RNA sequence: GGGCGCUUAGCUCAGCGGGAGAGCGCUUCCCUUACAAGGAAGAUGUCACAGGUUCAAAUCCUGUAGCGCCCACCA
């Protein structure tokens, strides 16, 4: 029977509506216009091991709002979703998983372990994307990328070979950050420093004469076996005389040269420092400068190796430290120890202490690539929003060091280098090409085997914006959608990722990877603390969605973005936005019951003052909305949407038309259509922010049952601009109503009681307005009558001022005037203040000479108004005394 | 050590050269046929401090203090 959809009388419930629309919202519709104009985004690919957290939700909501806005604007738009293989993180996770299943991963071959990881990935690797999809993202879900996909791997090989052939990638045996737990090298960025309480030890190192000694301080006594020298500062008077002599190392036969080097800081420790080049980056540099030898005393697992005395071999660093300390004491070489706080390098994934170790690793020389990136930003080819992040970016790029790109793990892109048995090497995209290139280069067939190391995960991530578009192939997507329009990310991966993408892209494609880098803030808990597993303060976005709905979460996130401060989130943070959804729901119910019976027509008349007002307000909203979103100012657009709907549409427009519908049934058709149209257009603007409720209501209002409509267009503005003058009258009207209500309240007149109200000192135009719309005043302020009086007439009145008139109520012995007197006195003070301010300004020669004319005119206007109001309030007060 | 950001209502934060704003909270009244997840009327601020620029400073500059973050170093 019921041919129409009807909005349920139940309160808004996200659970009833959100599941219905997910498919339609996330259905990817390829736009295909010939226009060169496009909008494309590379999603920051979440790790396959990941679970949705609020950072993802914030990050993707921002992107989705911009994507949906561009889709509505009919711009060709591409947003490719995907995941990152996350080398170390994934291998670690799967190995732990296998260990739990009692599988000893150390006995597995490379192939066996790889197949286990793939199995895990195929089963669990899309969890994060499924969770992301629930947010209602308009990605191209039918084309999901993964960094280990065949085509993306081909991009990686291509990139590697090109960089290698340019001489930017090289292999070097040097000191690297070695994770003794994972047994792989890691990059500088993956090392974090943790402050720990430890001790600084002072030892004597005797000179050859056996009498004199130098006191050396160290936090790492166990490294004595790797010492090759003792450095003293050239200005060190005490130790200067020993320079060039030799001291003996207490535990091995090596003689240590006393060298002079600025590096020895006289303020630190004893002022003399032992040089252990095999296990310290600074010492390594000193040793190189002085041509000293390097000694490695550690195995890959962090235990002491065969270059230390027998009874120390195989000991852990901690045990060796204790043992050395004891021996030092026994030998009377120990001087003292001191409690200090010391920053210890730790691997960000494993949590293990990082040992600098001498290793053969692959490096990418990024110095020149970094310079190109800096230039691109300085030229404005890439713009950071907010701009202050550019400084941070420059600072890091300027002091960038070669990037260690090889990892001794198996999950990742195996480095496309082939070795012959006699260690000649060739870089090639695959074995066939390797054979060919090898023969050309070396004139022989090599028995080639591939490098076993894999690439740092961030190497492939660095190619993401163009590898996902098909590079190095000149695909349609690559030629149309690259460079991408915007990159949205948190500041925590500017260096890990943004910088690497910039360098790779400029080097390999000759173009920047994106035009804008939008850096957003972090989400913290209500106390402003970072959310973390260890603190147990993590809020799961899925729980928030469950309780408040995706729409509320999205609107919350969109509203809270700010360049300067992080978002603090507590249990109640989403409530205002859930309430907003509820408000939209209920208002739509009103609109539907009051408009659906009306036949649609093309020539709707917008001639009632409130229709003109609300359509003009909508035009204003639309203008701001567009300009904010063009500038990625998502939070400002959200603010405008919220206040337009709640303050203008609900609190005034609907309240007025309600009265109109009762009073002038016959003459209300156009207003009903205007009202419905405003709501429809509003839902289009809401759609990028809160798509589910938008679609639900849009369909309830416009579609037939069994039909599902997608919101697919930006609304057009109304042509009411020539009627803008009515805006001022509307404001006077609002002020007048508020003023009556306020007076009633101050006189404690019960809200249900109808009274007679008087007005005077009114502009003739507004008088006509009142006469035409008397009933609106009566209803909105609950009056029996609203009558003009001549002020000169000696009525016994108590009054309040509105912006363009005075409104009054007859005195009554029941009234307590005090609150009204208090209010008027307060008004008087503020008007006095305004008056003096304006007066002073206008007496100021400098102001009159320098200020722009419109400011001066405005000030004159203010002076006039404040004077009138001040005098009037005085007058009103005298009536009361 | 180098750099960045912040300090505005009780709380969380907008505003960033021309009369101090929002949400939450608070006070009073109201279940008025869209909505109590609501409506109406309100109260609340030396815009961290000190100088300076300007006719005009919450807003620009300099300095100080407190908070937070990043990078480097860490004998």
Image: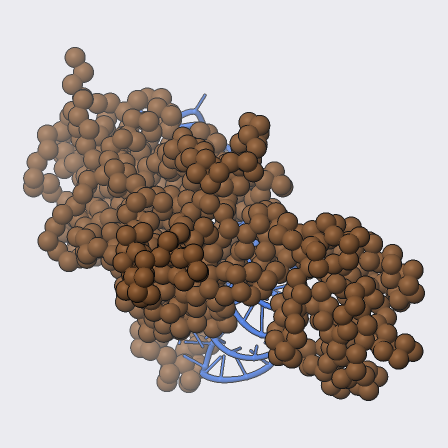
Residue A238 vertical position relative to residue A584 in the rendered view, above or below: below
- Viewer-side residue, A428 vs A276: A428
On screen, residue B37 versus residue A759, left or right, reads right
Colour seen for chain B: blue
Residue A730 in view here: no
Image position, residue A155 (x, y; %): 30, 53
Q: Which chain is brown?
A: A
On screen, residue A665 versus residue A554, left or right, reads left
On screen, residue B56 versus residue A806, left or right, reads right
Residue A310 vertical position relative to residue A95 in the rendered view, above or below: below
**Considering the image in quadrants, where does the N terminus of chain A appear?**
top left
Give the image quarter of residue A185: bottom right
Q: Identify the residue at horizontal 23%, vertical 39% (top origin).
A: A28
Image position, residue A519 (x, y; %): 42, 57
Q: Identify the residue at horizontal 26%, vertical 40% (top origin).
A: A143
Residue A153 in view here: yes
On screen, residue A41 versus residue A452, left or right, reads left
Image position, residue A315 (x, y; %): 74, 50
- Viewer-side residue, A644 vs B55: A644
């Amino acid at each position: 029977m019921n041919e129409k959809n009807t909005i349920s009388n139940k309160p808004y419930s996200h659970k009833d509506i959100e599941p219905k629309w997910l498919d339609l919202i996330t259905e990817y519709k390829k736009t295909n216009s010939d226009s060169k104009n496009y909008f494309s985004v590379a999603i920051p690919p979440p790790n396959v091991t990941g679970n949705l957290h609020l950072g993802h939700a914030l990050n993707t909501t921002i992107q989705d709002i911009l994507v949906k806005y561009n889709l509505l604007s009919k711009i060709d738009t591409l947003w490719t979703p995907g995941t990152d293989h996350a080398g170390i993180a994934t291998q670690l996770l799967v190995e732990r998983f296998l260990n739990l299943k009692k599988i000893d991963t150390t006995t597995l071959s490379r192939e066996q372990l790889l197949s286990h990881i793939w199995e895990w990935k195929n089963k669990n690797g899309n969890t994060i994307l499924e969770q992301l999809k629930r947010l209602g993202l308009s990605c191209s879900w039918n084309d999901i990328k993964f960094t280990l996909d065949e085509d993306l791997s081909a991009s990686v090989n291509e990139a590697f070979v090109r960089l290698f052939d340019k001489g930017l990638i090289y292999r070097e045996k040097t000191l690297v950050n070695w994770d003794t737990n994972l047994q792989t090298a890691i990059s500088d960025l993956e090392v974090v420093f943790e402050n720990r309480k430890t001790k600084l030890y002072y030892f004597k190192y005797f000179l050859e004469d056996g009498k004199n000694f130098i006191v050396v301080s160290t936090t790492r006594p166990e490294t004595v076996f790797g010492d090759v020298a003792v450095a003293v500062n050239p200005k060190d008077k005490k130790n200067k005389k020993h320079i060039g002599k030799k001291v003996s190392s207490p535990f091995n036969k090596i003689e240590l040269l006393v060298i002079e080097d600025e590096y020895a800081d006289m303020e630190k420790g004893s002022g003399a420092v032992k040089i252990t080049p095999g296990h310290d980056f600074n010492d390594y540099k000193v040793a190189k400068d002085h041509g000293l030898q390097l000694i490695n005393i550690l195995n890959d697992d962090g235990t002491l190796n065969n270059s230390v005395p027998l009874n120390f071999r195989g000991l852990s660093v901690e045990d060796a430290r204790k043992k050395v300390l004891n021996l030092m004491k026994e030998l009377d070489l120990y001087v003292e120890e001191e409690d200090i706080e010391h920053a210890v390098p730790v691997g960000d994934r494993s949590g293990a202490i990082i040992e600098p170790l001498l290793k053969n690793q692959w490096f990418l020389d990024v110095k020149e690539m970094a310079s190109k990136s800096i230039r691109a930003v300085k030229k404005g080819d890439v713009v950071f929003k907010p701009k202050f992040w550019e400084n941070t970016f420059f600072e890091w790029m300027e002091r960038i060091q070669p990037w260690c790109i090889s990892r001794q793990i198996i999950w990742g892109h195996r480095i496309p280098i082939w070795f012959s048995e006699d260690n000649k090497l060739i870089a090639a995209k695959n074995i066939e090409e390797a054979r060919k290139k090898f023969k050309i280069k070396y004139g022989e067939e090599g028995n080639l085997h591939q490098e076993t190391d894999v690439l740092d995960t961030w190497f492939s991530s660095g190619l993401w914006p163009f590898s996902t578009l098909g590079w190095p192939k000149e695909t349609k997507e690559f030629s149309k959608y690259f460079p991408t329009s915007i990159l949205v990310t948190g500041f925590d991966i500017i260096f890990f990722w943004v910088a690497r993408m910039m360098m790779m892209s400029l080097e390999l494609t000759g173009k920047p990877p994106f035009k804008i880098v939008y850096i957003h803030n972090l989400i913290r808990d209500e106390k402003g603390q970072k959310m973390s597993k260890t603190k147990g303060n993590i809020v799961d976005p899925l729980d928030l969605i469950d309780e408040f709905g995706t729409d509320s979460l999205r609107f919350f996130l969109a509203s809270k973005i700010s360049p300067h401060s992080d978002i603090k989130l507590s249990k109640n943070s989403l409530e205002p936005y859930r309430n907003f959804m509820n408000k939209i729901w209920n208002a739509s119910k009103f609109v539907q019951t009051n408009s659906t019976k009306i036949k649609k027509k093309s020539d709707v008349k917008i001639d009632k003052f409130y229709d003109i007002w609300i359509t003009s307000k909508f035009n204003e909203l639309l203008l701001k909305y567009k300009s904010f979103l063009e500038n990625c100012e998502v939070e400002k657009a959200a603010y405008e949407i919220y206040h337009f709907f709640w303050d203008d549409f609900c609190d005034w427009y609907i309240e007025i038309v309600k009265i109109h519908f009762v009073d002038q049934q016959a003459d209300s058709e156009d207003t009903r259509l205007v009202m419905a149209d405003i709501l429809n257009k509003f839902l289009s603007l809401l759609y990028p922010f809160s798509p589910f409720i938008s679609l639900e209501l849009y369909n309830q209002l416009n579609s037939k049952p069994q039909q599902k409509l997608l919101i697919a267009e930006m609304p057009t503005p109304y042509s009411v601009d020539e009627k803008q003058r009515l805006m001022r009258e509307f404001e006077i009207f609002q002020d007048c109503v508020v003023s009556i209500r306020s007076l009633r309240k101050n006189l404690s007149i019960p809200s249900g009681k109808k009274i007679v109200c008087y007005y005077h000192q009114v502009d003739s135009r507004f008088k006509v307005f009142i006469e035409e719309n008397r009933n609106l005043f009566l209803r909105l302020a609950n009056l029996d009558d609203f009558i003009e009086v001549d002020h000169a007439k000696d009525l016994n009145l108590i009054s309040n001022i509105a912006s363009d008139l005075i409104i009054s109520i007859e005195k009554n012995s029941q009234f307590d005037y005090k609150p009204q007197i208090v209010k008027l006195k307060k008004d008087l003070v503020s008007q006095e203040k305004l008056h003096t301010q304006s007066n002073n300004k206008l007496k100021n020669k400098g102001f009159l000479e320098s200020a722009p004319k419109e400011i001066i005119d405005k000030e004159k206007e203010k002076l006039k108004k404040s004077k009138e109001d001040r005098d009037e309030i005085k007058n009103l007060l005298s009536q009361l005394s």
